[in-house]
Amino acid sequence: MERTFAIIKPDAFAAGNAGKIIARIYAEGFKVVGIKKLYLSKVEAEGFYAVHRERPFFGELTDFMSSGPCIVMVLEAQNAIKKWRDLMGATNPAAAVEGSLRREFGSSVGENATHGSDAPETAAFEMGYFFSGLELL
């Protein structure tokens, strides 16, 4: 089994789609081993996305991620990282495949409903940023 990190972003939460996304997570065979509702501060968002600090979209991204509540999760499944990224779909909802979460719930590249780790090392950092080992079932 593999673990990955996932976020239901503020846009999806505000639109009332968090429950639908969580239902899809379970329907696709993931086990949720950690889950929290958070309201990230700007500083917390900047720390989480520090790898993108030099990119032109950093300020817009961290403003958005600190604009409202989100749900952070640790998911477990066989090949969880790839499986979650496939379920999310492409970063641009317009380019995401039918049936993917971003196609269904995202509205733009910036407001695309979900986040997921892209590699085991990223997943380890992201899970550790929000969860202690004692919080993961």
Image (spheres, rainbow, N blue to C red):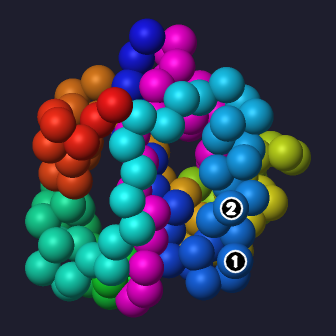
Asked which secondary structure carries label 1, the reply is loop
Crowding around mark 1 (Cα neighbors within 10 Å: few <14, some 14 to 19, many 20+) is few
Residue 108 spot, x, y in % from top left: 64, 73
Task: Look at label 2 and name its amino acid.
Answer: Gly
Give the residue pinned by disc 1: 16
Q: Is residue 74 visible?
A: yes
Residue 136: quadrant of the picture = top left
Quadrant containing the C terminus is top left
Pick the front one: 25 or 125: 25
Q: Foreground residue, 135 or 70?
A: 135
Distance Cα–Cα, label 2 vs label 1: 7 Å
Q: Which residues are magenta?
A: 67-90
Does the magenta portion include 85? yes
Q: Amino acid at mark 1?
A: Gly
Residue 108, placed above or below residue 7: below
Contact? badges 2 and 1 (CB < 8 Å): yes
Q: Is residue 81 visible?
A: no
- Image position of 33 (left or right of 110): left
Name the residue carrying label 2: 19
Residue 99 falls within the magenta-colored stretch = no
The count of marks equals: 2
| Left or right of 53 on screen, residue 39 | right
Q: Position of residue 63 (x, y in %)?
A: 32, 86
Q: Nearer the viewer, residue 27 or 102?
A: 27
Q: Residue at x 52, y 61 (%)?
A: 8
Q: Is residue 57 left or right of residue 90?
A: left
Mark number displayed over residue 89: none
Q: Position of residue 29 (x, y in %)?
A: 67, 25
Task: Identify whether 119 is placed above or below 91.
Answer: above
Residue at image position (34%, 72%) is: 38
